[in-house]
Image: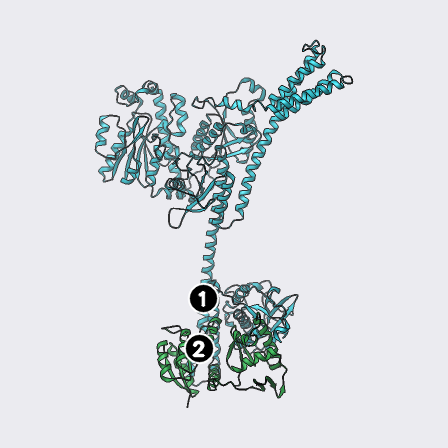
Amino acid sequence: MAARILIVDDEVAIRRLLRNTLERAGYAVAEAMNGREALVQASAHEPDAILLDLGLPDRDGLTLIPMLRKQANGVILVVSAREATEEKVAALDLGADDYVTKPFDTDELLARLRVALRHHGGSGVTPKLVRRGDITIDLDRRLVCRAGRELHLTRKEHDVLAVLARHIGRVVTHERIIAAAWSGEEDPRVEYLRIVIRNLRQKLEAPGPVGSVIANELGVGYRLRSDS
Amino acid sequence: MPLSGDDRPDPDALLRQAAQEGRGRLKIFLGAAPGVGKTYEMLSEGAARRRDGVDVVVAVVETHGRAETEALVRGHEVLPRRDVPYEGRTLHEMDLDAVLARAPRLALVDELAHTNAPGSRHPKRFQDVEELLAAGIDVYSTINIQHVESLNDVVASFTRVRVRETVPDRILEMAEVEVVDIPPDELIERLKAGKVYLPHEATRALNHFFSKSNLSALRELALRRAAQAVDAQMLEHVRAIGVGGTWAGSERIVVAVSELPGADGLVRAAKRLSDALKAPWTALFIETPRTGQFTDAQHARIAATMSLATQLGGAIATVPASSALEGIQAFVADARATQLVVGKSKRSRWFELRYGSVVDRLVRGTPGVTVHVLPVEEVPGPGGSEATQAGRTRGRGWGSPVGYGLTLLGVAAVTALASTLFHVLNLGNVALLYLLPVMAAASLYGLRTGLFAGLASSLCYNFFFLPPTGTLTVNNPENIVSVFVLLGVAVATSQLTARVRAQADIAAASARTNATLAGFLHQLSGVSEAAEAARVICNDVGRLFDVQAVLLAPSSGGGLGVLAATDPDYRLDTMDLAAANWAFDTGGAAGKGSGTLAASEWLFQPLKSGAGTLAVLGLARENGSEPVRADQLPLLTSLVNQAALVIERLRLQAEIRDVDAVRTRDRLRAALLSSVSHDLRTPLTAVLAAADALDHGATPELIGTIKSEASRLNRFVANLLDMTRVEAGALKLSVEAVDLSDAVAGAAHDARRALEGHPVRLDVPPDLPLVRADPQLLHHCLLNLLDNAGRYGDPGTEIVIEGRHRYGQLRLAVLDHGPGLPPGRETEVFETFRRLEGSDRAAGGTGLGLAIVKAFAEAMGLGVEAGNREDGSGAAFAILFPPSLIVRDVAQESIS
């Protein structure tokens, strides 16, 4: 059965565009043009994913995220023209699964949606083994292999990669990564994370371009790119 | 001689005219003498106005029981008088507040020169009238010619009657003047017929006053004064509307005033001269060593004379010099004066023989200057004995008893010394020894002690050494000479010393004044905010005069508000505020120690500039005494003038800043409009055209056009948003450690459409240190630099992003292959909406991108650079990270 997607946006042109795109990709689509309708639709249709615009006529989309989270079990993708990093971080902290800024690349949007849905499908149970290209990450045994050869990672590198791998394809905020890898340490800083990411990239990406495996979300966090 | 041929209106004159609007108009009925019918004329004209429907009231009119006048008064609405008990009698004064409350269109106020009863708001009735005018009420009033301030002396000189009630000339100058004139014969007839009211006790004196020759002279004066008033108003009008009026501008008048009574006569003469020549004038006082010995009364008289000069419209100056002659010569030369008015005191023949006439030397020493010499007559008055009092204090007193004691000791010591050495000294040398105590006493304790030493020395010399010793008789006439020499030396030494000391005193005083002024100016010169200037002015004035000071200026809510105060707990009651408002509105001093509202605890001095009064400085003393001594007034005036200049300078600067800001904004707005219309419409046109063409089948080319034009549009909108944030000052930094290799890769990814057709090489070493920056702003900087490189780089050429860590600084550069930048104009590319020649609009630049790069970089504390590549193959733009923004090595244990 096709996954059900709820589009929440007050602009009819955007809704039409999204509906076309999503239906062509094989999803079932419902629409809501404001916050109130979104809540009604969410409880009525139990969508698998909600594409949520933040600038709604009746209420701020940010306040809607926790309410939708309570009502529906689906993933929430924020699709908004707001690009301030605080807004992105706030949306993620409130429970959104990902954030796409307008104007968006439809292919990119579809890819994010796919990732979110796939991840959501196995919710509750974290996979033991995460694969990405020629990289295999064994979360239980703390083993990382590239092209069949085991890579030597430091403890911190391993902690950071593990957080990203558990949320593969989705952005993880700096705070969450730091909380996971530097928990209990005095004065953890973003610069430590930057250096660790740089070292990880050396080991996982070289000689490819920077960011091909671990993508940087400006001011928000990092994402382990999934295949596709 | 016309100064210049331009017909531009004089802004000051226009301002003065504008100030007149909204004020009431004053008409003065001017008469040559009592009895000519001024009051009658005023009442008749008032009646005529009333018949025209004008709201006329009689504020105060003295009918002196004359039936015709009384009949005229009866036709009018007469406001009740205010009864003031004074020394057992009851005076009936005009009720100023009643008139203000009644607010008629026209008020009739008789006897403009009248002095109000003590305790009234203003000492003089003309001040009441000024208040009525300020309230927008027209006033008709009357005055006799001898009450006009500048003519006071002239009238007194031929009538032998001096009136004490005078009205400043400026009042006449702002009024319409109508002369009420009857021939002298007729006036004398009326006098004989008893139709002229005269105060009973003065009848006999006034009979002399009413001689025919006097009346003719007075009549001529009145007519001339009226003509002059018309002249002055005409001139003002001509200057205001810029009709090429002739200026007698090359004339400058200086009047030298002294402490002697009668100096005010000189000032009035200068005023008359200035009126006749239409020339500016200055009252000059020279501070000499003698000034330090003046009595308080003399200081007060100088201040009064100077303030009279100010009232009469002259400038004032106080200059220190070693002698009056030198000071006057120097000032006249500096001010390029053409006319000099001096007084000649009656000095003895003997004095002139000895010192030569000062006036003669003055005339010789100031070539090209017309010198007017007027006799200074001492008018016997209440202060007639001051000169002698001053003479007494000038002698430096009797000296201290200690001085006499020490002198005696000195003389005794010399006597002892001389007697021990007598066998080796001759008589003459003993006399020389006695010079020592004489000179010491004269130089240390002044003339009298010196003379005492001389006397004691000669007695001792005579008694102990001159034969016959042991007696006071002298048998050798030669030795009498020795005695006189000792006395002479005492006199000469003490006088020399006294003069040197006085000169040193005045030099020190003048240096103190100059240092005070210089320090004050220095404090103020560094100030760029009006509020700070106000604080400095208050604090300095408070400190210098040891008073409380407040500075008031018009506030936005209307009325005066306090800008600064030395003591935060200052108290200004209703009376004080009234005085402050008075000082602000009239531009004259008010409050304690001034002529107006003296019941206030504060003295308020206006800070005036060419454009009017800017602020009011208030001074008060804790114990309620007069805030400023008379001899400090010139210093206060200088400080206030300087403060006014500074405040005006700041105000002008602020205005210029505002104008500049508006101009820049206008320029930007115009550029923005043209940029927006071009840069928004071009991609929209392309998108619409491509979308239309899609109907005939989609081609990859059309779809590519839509995508790239739309992304260009998106970039432009982002830039507009960014620029708005910069201009609105709404840039919020969120700085964190940034990995440049990451930032560069992200920017290159996001700019991929703009970079289409260019191979991109990222040359950022992986071991480059982290930097501190706002990742979002840095991203936008890089996007714009890449966008720029993609646009101006020749198609197909490589674009390089290069990061280098050198000399502690980190440099991130974007290099292209293309025409590069015109040499010498590299930095201009960072200006908003700037596109250099050779970069036509086809390239699609908005002129915003690089301005945003600069604004964002500077907000983050980074530098920007624009130039050409070293080999000249294209342009090189760089962002520079200073050492302070480079993250030091991260501890290994934190990351392993």
Secondary element at image label 1 = helix
Q: Which chain is cyan?
A: B
Q: Nearer the viewer, residue B630 or B317?
A: B630
In this rendering, would B602 be left or right of A215? left
Dot 2, how many residues are within 10 Å of its Cα: few (below 14), some (14-19), or many (20+)? many
Please tell me in which quadrant of the rendered image residue B30 appears. Answer: top left
The tint chain A carries is green
Dot 1, how many residues are within 10 Å of its Cα: few (below 14), some (14-19), or many (20+)? some
Q: Position of residue B117 (x, y in %)?
A: 34, 30
| Residue on which disc 2 sits | A79
Q: Position of residue A7 (x, y in %)?
A: 40, 81
In this rendering, would B309 be left or right of B889? left
Q: Is residue B178 above or below residue B715?
A: above
Dot 1: chain letter: B
Dot 2: chain letter: A
Secondary element at image label 2 = strand
Residue B674's disc number: 1
**Disc 2 and disc 1: Cα gap in Å?**
33 Å
In this rendering, would B479 be left or right of B895? right
In this rendering, would A113 be left or right of A139? left
Residue B506 seen anywhere in this rendered image of the structure: yes
Q: Are marks 2 and 1 on the same chain?
A: no
Residue B104 seen anywhere in this rendered image of the structure: no
